[in-house]
């Protein structure tokens, strides 16, 4: 049985004439080009202590069953705890998915264009200190949601090369780390442009750069060597 209809099952969202750039970061989940910040819920980290306790109990019951020569399949206490651990993991997964679904829908519904940086998580995941935080944030799933929801609802989502988006002053175009100026580090959350004197919140400035780069409207930097 096939169903046919002239009416689309999913309707396009109304046009808003709004565009937005988003900077994904670990301090917060994202900062947008309007200056709004979405906090990082860190679902895994919040449940980490409870999950670790449940897994320790599971390990003890596994060792006890093996010591007594019982099959794990037949050990009721082990199987009960295994399900408890699985439920905790599933709860974390569902919380993260719900958060990402709601946020991605709001961004696509309220903007005609959403722009983010290309995600290069494979390189970031080589840093073990960041790996858990990156996995907990669910960035790749989030960008996938933005992409398919934009296609589904008649909006536009694009990603851009992240080169210089963090180091560039969106006001004058000066790029830190060039022309004798010191490159910004991860610790530099706020900074003042040495060329034009503009004060920047790092992630907000980056999100403005992300949007401008996608539109090809980057200003040429005002070259001025540091004294």
Image (cartoon, rainbow, N blue to C red):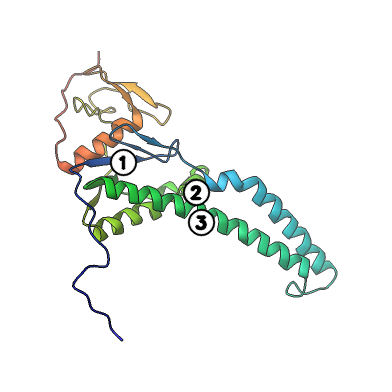
* Mark 3 / mark 1, whichever is N-terminal: 1
Residue 94: mark: 3
Left or right, 114 with reference to 220? right
For image coordinates 27% across by 40% down, the residue present is: 21
Q: At 43% from the left edge and 37% from the top edge, which residue is drawn?
A: 28
* Residue that label 1 marks: 22
**Residue placed most toward the observer, 202 or 127:** 202
Q: Residue 26 location in percent, x, y?
A: 44, 39
**What number of labels is visible?**
3
Q: Nearer the viewer, mark 3 or mark 2?
A: 3
Q: At which x and y percent is residue 83?
A: 66, 64
Query: Dot 2 corresponds to which residue?
Result: 136
Name of the residue lying farthest toward the right: 68
Quick check: marks 1 and 2 in contact, CB under 8 Å? no
User: Along the polypeptide, which appears first: circle 3 or circle 2?
Assistant: 3
Front residue of 10/180: it is: 10
């Amino acid at each position: 049985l096939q169903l046919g209809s002239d009416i689309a099952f999913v309707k396009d969202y109304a046009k808003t004439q709004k565009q937005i750039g988003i900077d994904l970061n670990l301090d917060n989940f994202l900062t947008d080009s309007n200056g709004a910040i979405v906090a990082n819920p860190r679902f895994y980290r919040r449940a980490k202590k409870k999950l670790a306790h449940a897994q320790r109990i599971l390990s003890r019951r596994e060792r006890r069953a093996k010591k007594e020569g019982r099959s794990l399949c037949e050990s009721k206490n082990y199987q009960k705890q295994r399900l408890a651990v699985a439920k905790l993991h599933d709860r974390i997964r569902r919380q993260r998915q719900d958060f990402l679904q709601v946020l991605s829908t709001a961004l696509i519904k309220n903007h005609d264009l959403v722009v983010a940086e290309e995600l290069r998580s494979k390189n970031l995941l080589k840093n073990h200190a960041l790996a858990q935080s990156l996995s907990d944030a669910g960035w790749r799933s989030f960008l996938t949601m933005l992409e398919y929801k934009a296609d589904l609802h008649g909006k536009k989502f694009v990603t851009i090369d992240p080169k210089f988006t963090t180091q560039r002053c969106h006001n004058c175009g000066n790029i830190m780390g060039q022309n004798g100026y010191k490159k910004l580090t991860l610790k530099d959350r706020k900074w003042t442009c040495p060329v034009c004197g503009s004060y920047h919140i790092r992630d907000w400035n980056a999100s403005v750069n992300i949007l401008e780069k996608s539109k090809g409207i980057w200003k040429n930097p005002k070259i001025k060597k540091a004294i």
